[in-house]
Structures are given as structure tokens and as C-alpha cells.
Image (tube, rainbow, N blue to C red):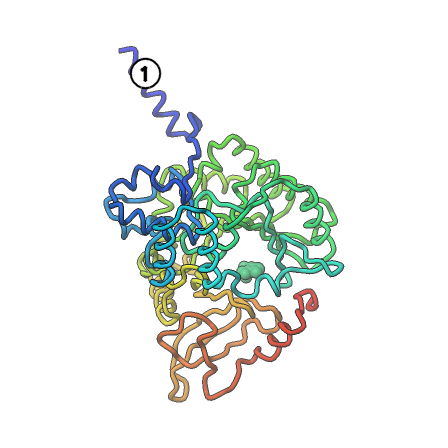
């Protein structure tokens, strides 16, 4: 008799998410054998995972394992594909090389040497991010910043260079390999603020990672609060790129400093900043748990706007119905669909890529199935060296089948929104596979882009 009431009370309180916060528990490549859910796989399957996980980053947490994956449907389950390594993510040669190493040696330095050899073959730094996007001050690169488009600066806080789980398709995979210095640095805060204060053309700060939401709230506050000072009036929008709503929504609900985080956002919004959470969702299943829905609700109550983005990924969301369902659910929960990306030419791209022609078809078919409020996602968009190039369509012009393209963003703002054309190619998966249509030799931006690369011209010349 006496035990009934406490039980009911506990259930009700648990439903409000403020009792017994779930402990964050994470597994990396060395702990694959400790993941109980993988017991159902054969020894050979687990070995395949280890082979891949010694080359590409692997990290998964218990919330994802327990709540997002349907273990009756592996290996096909989309969230299983999103976080667990699959054999096809490496080429056969690369896979065989690493498998042979693991079979014959447990010497970390031998494993690492081979891993690094393979990684170098996977285009670890795509779109010239390192050579062209990092700004210089007094001939010194400013680490942790990328400034590619006039209005927007990307900031990579050193203590945000990890995620609650890793996505197997991540284009930033190379950042998660090797030693990490996760110490909080005041120097870094100052470098960011000095840079922002200096360039009045910057309206948007985009804090990214890894995942900035792995940071403690007071670290985040050290970056954000000073932006309320008058010298930063031009920085109107603060965007935070994060996968935490999928991988650890508890961040906004019952982590130790959740309330502190939400009140920081509320203060920023009340003081007049547009705070945008750029949420990564790859599949509608990530939005199904009660804790993520509670997190979205709490975030929206602070006045932030949640915008969503994802690449189109074979094995995960290569289906218009998945996108239509995802966009509908996002609108339903009060989020704004923002971008559909094309999987970048790096890392495990072989496994996830889809032809550009297919990407456009999925986009169009998905868009057709949702109301206007779900049609705010632009794409499919390739984040390539010259800029973000959107596939607007496939059509016939004077007897030639062509892709119609445009820049959504460009190193030179003047390139934006000018339609241009490429010869149709059913197999092309990236911008550098495309050739100009109508027998032309070059795309309109090519000479100027080549000159920028040669002279290392930064976007600041356009302000
Ligand atoms: C996508 C991107 C941005 C933001 O572009 P928006 O079109 O404003 O969303 C900024 N910097 C880089 C390097 C990007 O790839």
C-alpha cells in the first residue's frame, strides 16, 4: 500500500524531466565491446566496426543507443547508420589495409601510422577551408576563426571541439582526430572580440565546432555576454550550430546548468540580439522523444529561433518522404527548415553521396508534399570552394540538358543569385564534376576565383 503513492509521484515528476537527471555516458572506438546493444552482432561484424572506427572518428552516447535506434532493424536503421561505423565507409583497399594491421598488431603507433596514411587519402580539409578562410592579423593566422562570406564569421571555440556523439558522415571529421586541447583560454575570447569589433560588415557570428553546446554555460556566456556592449551593435545575429537536440536534448532540460543556459539566451534576446540555434536533424526519428520536444519548447520560450539543416545522405535520408515528414514535424514543433546540403567530398563520402540529379529530385518531391511553411529550406546546396551552390533544377535549353545553378553564398557577394548552367551529368556528385553548358570553357566566376586562390584574397576586401 505505502509504496503506491511514491511510485506514481515519481512517474509524474519524471514526466516533467526535473527529477534524477540522466547521466551522460559515452563510448569511443576503444569501448566498442562495452556497448551491450552490440552483443547481437557477430564477432566479425564488430571487428568491421573497429576497423572503420580506427580511421574515422567514432563516439556514441547511451541516450542515442537507448532512444533513437531501433535495434530490431539493424544494420538498416537510419540512426544506427548515422552513428555506427559501416564497412562501406572505407574503400576496399583502405579497409583491408587497416584490417590487416589490426589483426597483426596492437601497437598504437603502428595503427596510428596506417590510420593517418588512409586519412590523407580522404580529402581531410575540403573546400580550401584552411588555406582561404582563416583570417590573418599581422601575418599571423587567427586560429579558431573562419571568415569566408562578408557578413558571417565562423568561430570554433577550443572547448567545443567535440560532440555528444559523432555523425559518421561528418565533413569536419578530421578535427576530431589527434590530440585535443580543450582548455578554456581567455586569450581566445579576446581574439574573437577584437576581430568582431574591427569589422563592421559582420552581422552574424556563427559559433560552431564540434558542438558548442558541449560547453558549460559559463564558458558560453564569456563569449556571448560581452557582445551586448555597444561596440558590437553591428553583430545582430548569434547563431549556434549544434546537434545536441538530437544527441543530448537533456542539455536544455535537466543538465546541471540547463537553466543558466536558457536564461543566458533569454538575456541575449531581450537585449535585442537574434539568437538562432542551427539544429542538425537528419531524420524525423530524432525528434520523437519527449525530452527533445521538451527541449525545443524550452528553447523557444527564451525567444531563440531554431532553424534546421541536414545533408542528403544515402542510407539515412535518401527518400523524399523522410524529408517531407521531417520538415512537417519541424514546422509542427515551431522550428524553421533552413538548408538541405549535398554531402561533401570528404571522409566517408563514398558511402553517403547521391548524384546531384537525385538530390534535386528528392528536394523537389519533398517540397511538393509540404505546405509553404515547410518550403523554407533552400537546396540542395554544395558548400564548395567558391561558395554555396544550389541546384535549382534540371531542364532542356536549346536541345541541351542542363543543370540550372546559382550561388546562395559566394566569396564575392556579386556572384550571388546569378543563374548559371552546367552540362547535365547523371553521375556527378560535386561541383568539380560539372562542366559548363553550351560549349563554354569556364564558369563565369572561374577566373576571379583562381585569382583569389593565387593571391589568398580574403573576403574582407569586399566590405
Ligand atoms: C554556410 C556558411 C556560412 C553561413 O551562410 P548563410 O548562407 O548565411 O547561412 C558562413 N560561413 C561558411 C564558411 C559557410 O559555409
Name the side, left or right, on which 255 lies relative to 101: right
Q: Measured along the vertical axis of the image, is residue 389 above or below residue 179?
A: below
Residue 305 in picture, x, y percent from top left:
52, 48
Q: As rendered, which of 425 and 253 lies closer to the eye? A: 425
Is residue 293 something that shows in the picture? no
The image quadrant where one finds the N terminus is top left
Can residue 211 be seen in this snapshot?
yes
* Quadrant housing residue 61: top left
Q: How many marks?
A: 1
Q: Is residue 15 above or below residue 385?
A: above
Residue 92 placement (x, y as % from top left): 33, 62
Q: Residue placed farthest to the right in the image?
A: 138
Mark 1 neighbour density, 10 Å: few (under 14) some (14–19) many (20 or more): few
Tell me where residue 222 appears, x and y as whole percent: 65, 40
Residue 322, above or below 443: above
Q: Is residue 283 left or right of residue 41?
A: right
In the image shown, does 330 or 252 lie closer to the viewer? 252
| In the image, residue 136 above or below residue 43 | below
Q: x%, y% of residue 119? A: 46, 59
Placement of the C terminus among the 4 image quadrants: bottom right
- Check mark 1 vs ligand 1: CB closer than 8 Å? yes or no: no
The residue sitting at the top extreme is: 2
Q: Residue at x 59, y 38 (%)?
A: 264
Q: Find ligand 1 in the image and state its quadrant.
A: bottom right
Q: Say left or right for 69 vs 55.
A: left
The residue that label 1 is drawn on is: 5
Q: Under tag 1, what secondary structure?
A: helix
Q: Quadrant of residue 302?
A: top right
Q: Name the residue nearer the viewer: 312 or 9.
A: 312
Amino acid at each position: 500500500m505505502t509504496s503506491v503513492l511514491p511510485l506514481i509521484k515519481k512517474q509524474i515528476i519524471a514526466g516533467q524531466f526535473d527529477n534524477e537527471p540522466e547521466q551522460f555516458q559515452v563510448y569511443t572506438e576503444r569501448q566498442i565491446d562495452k556497448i551491450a546493444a552490440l552483443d547481437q552482432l557477430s564477432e566479425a561484424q564488430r571487428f568491421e566496426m573497429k576497423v572503420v572506427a580506427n580511421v574515422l572518428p567514432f563516439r556514441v552516447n547511451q541516450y542515442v543507443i537507448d532512444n533513437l535506434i531501433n535495434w530490431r532493424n539493424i544494420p538498416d536503421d537510419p540512426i544506427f547508420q548515422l552513428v555506427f561505423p559501416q564497412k562501406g565507409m572505407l574503400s576496399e583497399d583502405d579497409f583491408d589495409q587497416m584490417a590487416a594491421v589490426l589483426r597483426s598488431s596492437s601497437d598504437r603507433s603502428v595503427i596510428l601510422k596506417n590510420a593517418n596514411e588512409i586519412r590523407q587519402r580522404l580529402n581531410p580539409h575540403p573546400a580550401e577551408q584552411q588555406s582561404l578562410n582563416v583570417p590573418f592579423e599581422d601575418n599571423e593566422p587567427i586560429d579558431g576563426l573562419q571568415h569566408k562570406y562578408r557578413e558571417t564569421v565562423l568561430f570554433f571555440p577550443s572547448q567545443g571541439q567535440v560532440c555528444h556523439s559523432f555523425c559518421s558522415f561528418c565533413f569536419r571529421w578530421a578535427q576530431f582526430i589527434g590530440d585535443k586541447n580543450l582548455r578554456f583560454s581567455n586569450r581566445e575570447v579576446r581574439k574573437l572580440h577584437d576581430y568582431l569589433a574591427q569589422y563592421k560588415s559582420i552581422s552574424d557570428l556563427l559559433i560552431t565546432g564540434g558542438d558548442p553546446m558541449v560547453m558549460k554555460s559559463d564558458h558560453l556566456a564569456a563569449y556571448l555576454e560581452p557582445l551586448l556592449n555597444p561596440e558590437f551593435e553591428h553583430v545582430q545575429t548569434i547563431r549556434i550550430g549544434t546537434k545536441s537536440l538530437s544527441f543530448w536534448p537533456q542539455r536544455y532540460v535537466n543538465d546541471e546548468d540547463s537553466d543558466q543556459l536558457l536564461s543566458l539566451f533569454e538575456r541575449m534576446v531581450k537585449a535585442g540580439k537574434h539568437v538562432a540555434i542551427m539544429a542538425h536533424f537528419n531524420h524525423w526519428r530524432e525528434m520523437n522523444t519527449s525530452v527533445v520536444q521538451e527541449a525545443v519548447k524550452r528553447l523557444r520560450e527564451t525567444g531563440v529561433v531554431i532553424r534546421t539543416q541536414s545533408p542528403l545522405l544515402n542510407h539515412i535520408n535518401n527518400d523524399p518522404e523522410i524529408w517531407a515528414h521531417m520538415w512537417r514535424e519541424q514546422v509542427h514543433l515551431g522550428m524553421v527548415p533552413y538548408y538541405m546540403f549535398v554531402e561533401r567530398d570528404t571522409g566517408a563520402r563514398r558511402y553517403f553521396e547521391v548524384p546531384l540529379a537525385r538530390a534535386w529530385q528528392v528536394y523537389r518531391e519533398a517540397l511538393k508534399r509540404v505546405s509553404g511553411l515547410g518550403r523554407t529550406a533552400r537546396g540542395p546546396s554544395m558548400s564548395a570552394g567558391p561558395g554555396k551552390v544550389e541546384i535549382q533544377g534540371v531542364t532542356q535549353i536549346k536541345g541541351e540538358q542542363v543543370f540550372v545553378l546559382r550561388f546562395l553564398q559566394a566569396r564575392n557577394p556579386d556572384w550571388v543569385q546569378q543563374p548559371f548552367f552546367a552540362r547535365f551529368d547523371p553521375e556527378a556528385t560535386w561541383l568539380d564534376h560539372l562542366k559548363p553548358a553550351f560549349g563554354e570553357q569556364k564558369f563565369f566566376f572561374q577566373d576571379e576565383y583562381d585569382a583569389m586562390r593565387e593571391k589568398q584574397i580574403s573576403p574582407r576586401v569586399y566590405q
